[in-house]
């Protein structure tokens, strides 16, 4: 069995996600991503998905707090945000996320 972080994994999942976002042509409404989000991928999604309503990020260890906040500001229609095992988000950061989603 091959694992996602295995060097012989035959697919570039980050690239596949970028292509899926691009193919949505700005109509992406819901995305659930586990493990592979980094600052660059989050920026790519936020620049091309202004109609996003639901975002779930799980176990994304390579995204910075700053990149997440900047991306959230670009989702004016965001209704649901699920952050599951996100070390870059601390308990006190939840209020900041709420404020950035309102502005």
Image: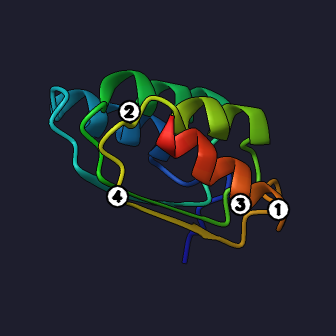
- Per the image, the residue denoted by label 3 is 94
48 lies above or below 15: above
In this rendering, the answer to whether 38 lies above or below 35 is above
Secondary element under disc 1, as helix, strand or loop, is: loop
Colouring method of the image? rainbow
| Inter-mark Cα distance, 4 to 2 | 22 Å
Asked whether 93 or 39 is in front, the reply is: 93
Q: Are marks 3 and 4 in contact (CB under 8 Å)?
A: no
Q: CA distance from mark 3 to mark 1?
A: 13 Å
Which is closer to the viewer, label 1 or label 2?
A: 1
Q: Nearer the viewer, mark 2 or mark 3?
A: 3
Mark closest to the chain's N terminus, 2 or 3: 2
Q: Position of residue 19 (x, y in %)?
A: 30, 32
For the residues labelled 3 and 4, the Cα–Cα distance comes to 15 Å
For mark 2, give the secondary structure.
Answer: helix
| Residue farthest bottom in this picture | 1
């Amino acid at each position: 069995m091959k694992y996602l972080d295995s060097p012989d994994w035959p697919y570039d999942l980050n690239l596949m996600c970028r292509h899926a976002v691009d193919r949505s042509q700005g109509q992406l409404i819901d995305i659930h991503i586990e493990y592979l989000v980094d600052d660059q991928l989050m920026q790519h999604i936020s620049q091309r998905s202004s109609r996003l309503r639901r975002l779930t990020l799980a176990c994304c260890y390579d995204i910075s707090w700053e990149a997440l906040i900047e991306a959230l500001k670009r989702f004016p229609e965001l209704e649901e945000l699920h952050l599951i095992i996100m070390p870059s988000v601390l308990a006190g950061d939840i209020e900041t996320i709420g404020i950035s989603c309102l502005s």
